[in-house]
Image (cartoon, rainbow, N blue to C red):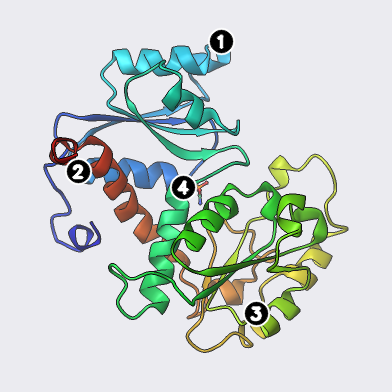
Amino acid sequence: MSEVNERDIKKLPTLRGKTVVNLFFEDSTRTRISFELAAKRLSADVINFAAKGSSISKGETLKDTAQTLEAMGADAIVLRHPSSGSAHRLAHSGWVESSVINAGDGLHEHPTQALLDAMTIRQAIVSSPIGSDLSGKKVLIVGDVAHSRVARSNLILLKELGASVAICGPATLIPSSLASNGGVYYSLDKAIDEFQPDAVMMLRIQTERMEASFFPTEREYSRLWGMNSQRLSRLSAPSVLLHPGPMNRGMEIDAASADSSKARILDQVENGVAVRMAVLFQLLSSDVKEAS
Ligand code: CP
């Protein structure tokens, strides 16, 4: 799919006649637009549904909304929802027959983000990215792990691919279930010096999900756990810096780091389109369905 995205005409006829619904109950820039672009590049019809301005405001449930969209011909529903487990519920409840793709459910998971992150890391630090794994590579995930569905999906996928994964952040933002495992650092300086990561993934501080104060001030957070030029210079030469976006510039990552040659943040965005094309292709292409 990456190769398709480099062509002059970035289009395949594969999903002609299929309809993909982007059902987003939370704000999104990257995920929603890349799913839309991915579906269009595969020639599917796309409906973008935002909860704001819909009959959700009149009390319509997820079940009724999804069934309404399916009655209009949806073949796949891409769901972003604030409740953990919502995508699993929609996929396995029997409410709809459409394919359901999790575009982020509460604090739980964001699987296509992990896929595009793994792809970006492989492109950057493994010499032959296609078909190769991440054995022996070290990935450090830094920041608000407690509220991060990106971290949870990456922990599963990167370990599956053979990477060694460590997490780092203030104790208040490291879930107790992970704190008891090895590979947890409470100092970013120590994590960089001891773990010597090949890739560092900075997480967004998710103030919208915080019901308490998890660190004294933004300035202190930035000083202790933020990526800056001084820390960036201590990473090994080939190592790379990732951020799922949207970034809080000046908090978890400073502008110089975000715009540095080590940053692969726009590669992540670019790979997001290819990964989501691949996911839609796997789920909706009659070629794949007949083969399986
Ligand atoms: N990374 C990510 O999910 O970004 P959006 O919220 O903009 O989709």
Nearest to N terminus: mark 1 or mark 2: 2
Asked whether residue 281 appears in the rendered view, the answer is: yes
**Where 235 falls versus 111 (above or below)?**
below
Query: Dot 3: what SS?
Result: helix
Nearest-to-viewer mark from 4 and 1: 4
Residue underneath mark 3:
195
Which badge, 4 or 3, comes first in the chain's sequence? 4
- Residue identified by numbered label 1: 58
Image quarter where the N terminus lies is: bottom left
Q: Quadrant of residue 120?
A: bottom left
The residue that mark 4 highlights is: 111
Do callouts 1 and 2 mark residues in contact (Cβ within 8 Å)?
no
Q: What amino acid is at disc 2?
A: Leu
Neighbor class of circle 2 (other Cα within 10 Å; few <14, some 14-19, many 20+) is many
**Whole-percent x, y for residue 183 in the image:** 68, 68
The single residue placed furthest to the right in the displayed view is: 216
In percent of width and height, residue 73 lies at: 25, 19
| Label 3 CB sits under 8 Å from any ligand 1 atom | no
Amino acid, disc 4: Pro
In the figure, 167 relative to 17: above or below? below
Q: Amino acid at mark 1?
A: Lys
Mark positioned earlier in the residue sequence (3 or 2): 2
Q: What is the spatial separation of the Cα atoms under label 3 and label 2, in whole angstroms?
A: 41 Å
Say which of 151 and 225 sits in front: 151
Tag 2 residue: 42
Q: Is mark 4 in CB contact (under 8 Å) with mark 2? A: no
Q: How far separated are the C-alphas under marks 1 and 2?
A: 34 Å
Compared with residue 160, is residue 282 higher up or lower down, i.e. above or below?
above
Q: Residue at x 36, y 72 (%)?
A: 123
Horizontal side of residue 236 vs 122, given as left or right: right
